[in-house]
Amino acid sequence: MRRALWAQEQERDAVARALHNEIGQAVSAIKMSAHLALDEADAKQRQQDLQDIIRIADDTVGRLRDLSTRLRPPQLSGLGLEAALRGEVEHLAGASADVTLQLPSLAQEPDEESALACFRGVQQALAHVLRHAPAARIQLTLTDAGDDGFSLLLAEDAGALEVGGGPAGFDLPLLHERVRALGGQLRLGSDAGGATLQLRLPYRVQAHGHSAPSPAGARRGSVRE
């Protein structure tokens, strides 16, 4: 528990630093450019100053959106886990990375705690792999694991998941504690073909980390590409 709280504080510190360093500097730059525009007699230079303000403001809006997503992914609540995973891959990987998705419909939609734990695992591990091995080939596979649970497997061929000496090396102590608290499992593996991260989580979480029985009539979806 103490380890989880420490990791949570580290996460908050990172957001606080980003707000201070990135957003604070951007707002200061906007203010400076506005003063220059007010004092500028030359019409062309004043127009350039105003364009700089617009550019910095646009960049700041993008940074705020990224920070907001780090705190709470909007797709997760509105569209579900599958859509959130697709959106995160598009955001982090872009067109240059080789990422394959296999995200079939699950037996049911995971509850908020399990979905968020799964999303955070992908978010952090994917960012880590792309940072250390931008040319890595990555595959994400989401499957129904039976026994009222589901599984997410991230496999990459560069062994980047092992850089730093295990889960704590790629900023996953909080995820590890969260998954255990929910009654799930986190496994990191490696072989000659690269490394894998597997999360297994219950669809429903009760108090004290026990999985709850599936509700009657839980939807069943067909597998799709």
Image (cartoon, rainbow, N blue to C red):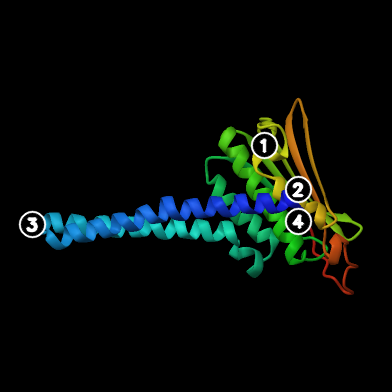
Residue carrying label 3: 42
For residue 104, which numbered disc appears in the image?
A: 4
Callout 4, which amino acid? Pro
In the displayed orientation, state which residue is furthest to the bottom.
Answer: 216
Are the residues flagged by discs 1 and 3 in contact, CB closer than 8 Å?
A: no
Please state which of the two labelled residues, at mark 4 or mark 1, is closer to the viewer. 1
Residue carrying label 2: 176
Callout 3, which amino acid? Asp
In whole angstroms, how far apart are the C-alphas of marks 1 and 3?
54 Å
Q: Is residue 133 visible?
A: no
Q: Nearer the viewer, residue 22 or 147?
A: 22
Callout 1, which amino acid? Gly
Are the residues flagged by discs 4 and 1 in contact, CB closer than 8 Å?
A: no
Label 1 vs 3, first from the N-terminus: 3
Label 2 vs 4, first from the N-terminus: 4
Instruction: Determine whether 8 is above or below 100 in the image.
Output: below
In whole angstroms, how far apart are the C-alphas of marks 4 and 3?
60 Å
Are the residues flagged by discs 2 and 4 in contact, CB closer than 8 Å?
A: no
In whole angstroms, how far apart are the C-alphas of marks 4 and 1?
30 Å
In whole angstroms, how far apart are the C-alphas of marks 2 and 4?
25 Å
Are the residues flagged by discs 2 and 3 in contact, CB closer than 8 Å?
A: no
Callout 2, which amino acid? His
Residue carrying label 1: 169
